[in-house]
Image (cartoon, rainbow, N blue to C red):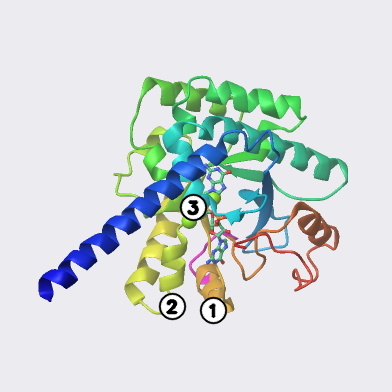
């Protein structure tokens, strides 16, 4: 009987692994041409100032709705797009769309500080990336100084000529850089001095743990101190409760982002909220563009 159970278990896992591979292949296949089929959209989530009512910054988050199949989360498809290289084209689309939208909102008189776009390590390594970023800004009439790129620590651990050139170009044009999910990578911190990083985004996992665990609260406080000592701003992401917000403010965090203020919203809904001067928080009637 034990042998029997063992064999079944083995079969179960191998089928499971097979299904996962099949799903990855299917996603990879579906990613090709997704831009042309106009299956991508951007959702926008504000980053609020912790200290005053200055206009918020806005982060663009990629959304993929496949007709007949539905929503697929970026956490699932971005790694696949990175592996097959399609992320370079998709990333260019994201940059262009975010700049186009930001310029349109600005022209309509909406007030916000900057638009932030997530950029993967694979995009940074692509030769000519920085030049394309600047070209895209110019093409859409959006100032590079108001386009922030959010990078992960893993994108910054290796100091290559391509990367150095990339950051030189971006710095020359004043493109702000943020380190996303800060604290989750296992890199040394040399890159903070080597590259022109202006902002640290404390990873959501620390924010989620800080009320329940004194050690985690020490970590967020240490990140705020570290960032400020290096002349950077510090942002907390994934803030869901007023208690978390209060503690982060006490710790000196500069900007707060999370469901507490707003989920990622469809462009229309974010514009409406900005227009109302952020008076009322987004309500139920707003279409949240999150998981299906
Ligand atoms: P991220 O850049 O760290 O974005 C934060 C993620 O947390 C987003 O998930 C957002 O919807 C979610 N979030 C925001 N506030 C809260 C909160 O209060 N509570 C909780 N539980 N979650 C919150 P999303 O949109 O599914 O994106 C996941 C990740 O996919 C992003 O993490 C980013 O790394 C990546 N991603 C998204 N769009 C792009 C893109 O255009 N390019 C690249 N390369 N990566 C992207
Ligand atoms: Mg981000
Ligand atoms: Mg993040
Ligand atoms: Mg994160």
Look at the image and give the residue range highlighted in magenta.
250-255
- Marks 3 and 2 sit apart, C-alpha to C-alpha, by 26 Å
Viewer-side residue, 132 vs 200: 132
Side of 242 where 202 appears, left or right? left
Residue bearing mark 3: 75
Mark 1 or mark 2, earlier in chain: 2
Indicate which label's residue lies in the foreground, 1 or 3: 3
Is there any visible trace of residue 121 in the rendered image? no
Residue 163 position (above or below residue 62): above
Question: Does the stretch in magenta take in 251?
Answer: yes
Residue appearing at x 61%, y 54% in the figure = 69
Side of 7 where 52 appears, left or right? right
Q: Quadrant of residue 240?
A: bottom right
Residue bearing mark 2: 211
Side of 263 where 17 appears, left or right? left
Mark 3 or mark 2, earlier in chain: 3
Is there any visible trace of residue 6 in the rendered image? yes
Mark 1 or mark 3, earlier in chain: 3
Under tag 2, what secondary structure? loop
Under tag 3, what secondary structure? helix
x and y percent of residue 274 in the render?
80, 58
Looking at the image, do the residues carrying marks 1 and 2 touch, with CB atoms under 8 Å apart?
A: yes
Q: Is mark 3 within 8 Å of ligand 1?
A: yes
Residue 213 position (above or below residue 141): below
Report the quarter where the C terminus lies.
bottom right
Q: Quadrant of residue 242?
A: bottom right
Circle 2 crowding by C-alpha within 10 Å: few under 14, some 14–19, many from 20: some
Residue bearing mark 1: 243
Question: Does the stretch in magenta take in 24?
Answer: no
């Amino acid at each position: 009987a034990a042998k029997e159970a063992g064999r079944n278990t083995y079969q179960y896992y191998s089928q499971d692994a097979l299904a996962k591979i099949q799903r990855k292949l299917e996603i990879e296949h579906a990613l090709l041409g997704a831009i042309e089929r106009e299956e991508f959209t951007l959702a926008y989530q504000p980053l609020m100032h912790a200290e005053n009512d200055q206009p918020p910054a806005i982060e663009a988050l990629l959304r993929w709705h496949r007709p007949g199949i539905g929503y697929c989360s970026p956490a699932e498809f971005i790694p696949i797009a990175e592996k097959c290289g399609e992320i370079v084209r998709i990333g260019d689309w994201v940059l262009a769309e975010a700049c186009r939208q930001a310029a349109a909102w600005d022209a309509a008189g909406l007030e916000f500080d900057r638009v932030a776009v997530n950029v993967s390590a694979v995009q940074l390594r692509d030769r000519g990336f920085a030049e394309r970023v600047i070209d895209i800004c110019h093409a859409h009439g959006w100032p590079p100084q108001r386009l922030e790129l959010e990078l992960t620590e893993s994108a910054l651990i290796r100091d290559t000529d391509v990367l150095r050139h990339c950051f030189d170009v971006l710095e020359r044009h004043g493109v702000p850089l943020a380190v996303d999910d800060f604290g989750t990578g296992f890199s040394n911190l040399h890159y903070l001095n080597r590259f022109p990083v202006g902002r640290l985004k404390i990873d959501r996992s620390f924010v989620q743990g800080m009320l329940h665990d004194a050690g985690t609260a020490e970590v967020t406080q240490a990140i705020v101190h570290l960032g400020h000592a290096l002349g950077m701003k510090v942002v907390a992401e994934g803030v869901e409760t007023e208690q978390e917000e209060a503690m982060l403010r006490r710790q000196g965090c500069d900007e707060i982002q999370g469901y507490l203020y707003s989920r990622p919203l469809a462009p229309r809904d974010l514009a409406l909220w900005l227009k109302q001067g952020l008076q009322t928080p987004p309500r139920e009637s707003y279409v949240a563009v999150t998981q299906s």
